[in-house]
Amino acid sequence: MYTEAYERAAHAIVDRLRRDELVDCAEPARVVAELEAVLIAFEQDLTALAEEVCRSVASVVQAQVAYQQALVERGWGTDDHQIAFLTTALIACLDESEAIDELYANDEQLLRIVKAALMDFVEAQERRVLGLLREPFAAAAGPVVGPRAAPTTPRFADLGEPFPLFEGPVDAADLDEEGPCVECGTKAAHRFRGGCYACFRAGKVQRPSAGTELGMIIPENVVEELTHGTPPGFDPRGTTTVPSDDAEPWVRYRVAGEWLTELLRTPAYSSWQDETWLFCCARPMVFRGPLDDSLLGELVLETKGSSESVVAALLECSSDDAEVQLDRALRGSLSIFVFRCPTCRRHRGLLDRS
């Protein structure tokens, strides 16, 4: 199992090209190494930039702001912009590789394969750099005023099974028990709709639907690039609205097919009520998990606010309401699911009651 994000991305690109017979090369390991070299260099550049920023600021908040500004100044940007920047570099690497005899993939195929592999890489770099930006200030800041951090629970990425849209703990996911994959027969410690991780991510085993605030999503919606929709008057969260053909008033939302596909290849989170994935900036947000002591502590540190102000921002409610909801969440009488937008970095919360 590949442990580093650059390993996973490079192998994913080469494996996909070979599987679909889109490349002719006698030395695939050499091609992987060339792609890894590009990603390692970028990883090192991000590390150097984070270290440079930390030497010139006095707090973790200033470090995060300065780091984002520096990324933009260097033309790297964040998230989707970073994926676009790296996609160009990796495709150039493939085109120039002497280890490749022939590359049969057309521009659209190559772009799709490389972008899909980079989602995990860019997300992993964001988490890694956030740790680098916090580290120099941790000792000086002393203990965080607020909730005590709970013991870290495993994430899918820790198990070598990353999901770009699911950063929450494994035990927050709606999974099947240990058993053989219904597609390939491989024994898996946990399964997704009966399939192993590899088959689930490849779409060989797929969720029949995903619930979102923009309406239900089923596989047929991927081709249309439209959700089932909601009654009119709902905030579209940055997406284009399309009137429904039905006689009843209804509005559908246009979402890129790659994101609808990603949702159907992401595990649902466990909830009392129906799953409702949140959106922002015309794309699905990243699920960070239910709000517990550990996650709340992270958000308090990031915002330099109080526990109540964090919850008020998540739920878009008053401070008094936030105090009540926070108490209920920490006592376990309700859940507050936390989502993060990879584009604008905003966090949103969703209440879930039994």
Image (spheres, rainbow, N blue to C red):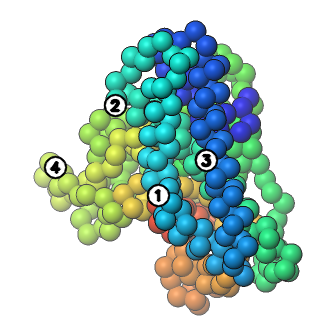
Using the image, determine if residue 328 lies above or below residue 4.
Answer: below
Q: Nearer the viewer, mark 4 or mark 1?
A: 1
Badges 1 and 3: C-beta atoms under 8 Å apart? no
Going by the numbered disc 3, the residue's amino acid type is Phe
Which of the image's four quarters has the N terminus? top right
Q: Disc 2 or 3, which lies upstream in sequence?
A: 3
Is residue 43 at all visible to an observer of this figure?
A: yes
The residue identified by callout 4 is: 246
Q: Is residue 181 above or below residue 169?
A: above
The mark closer to the camera, 3 or 4, is 3
- The Cα–Cα distance between marks 2 and 3, rounded to whole angstroms, is 24 Å
Question: Which residue is painted at 46% across and 33% down in the image?
Answer: 92
Q: Is residue 27 above or below residue 76?
A: above
Horizontal arrangement in the rendering, residue 146 relative to residue 124 (left or right): right
**Which residue is label 2 attached to?**
108
Q: Look at mark 3 in the image and give the residue it sits on.
A: 42
Residue at the extreme top of the image, as rendered? 26
Kindly tell me whether residue 331 is visible in this rendering. no
On screen, residue 193 above or below 303: above
Q: Please name the amino acid that badge 1 sits on.
A: Gly
Q: Residue at x 28, y 54 (%)?
A: 253
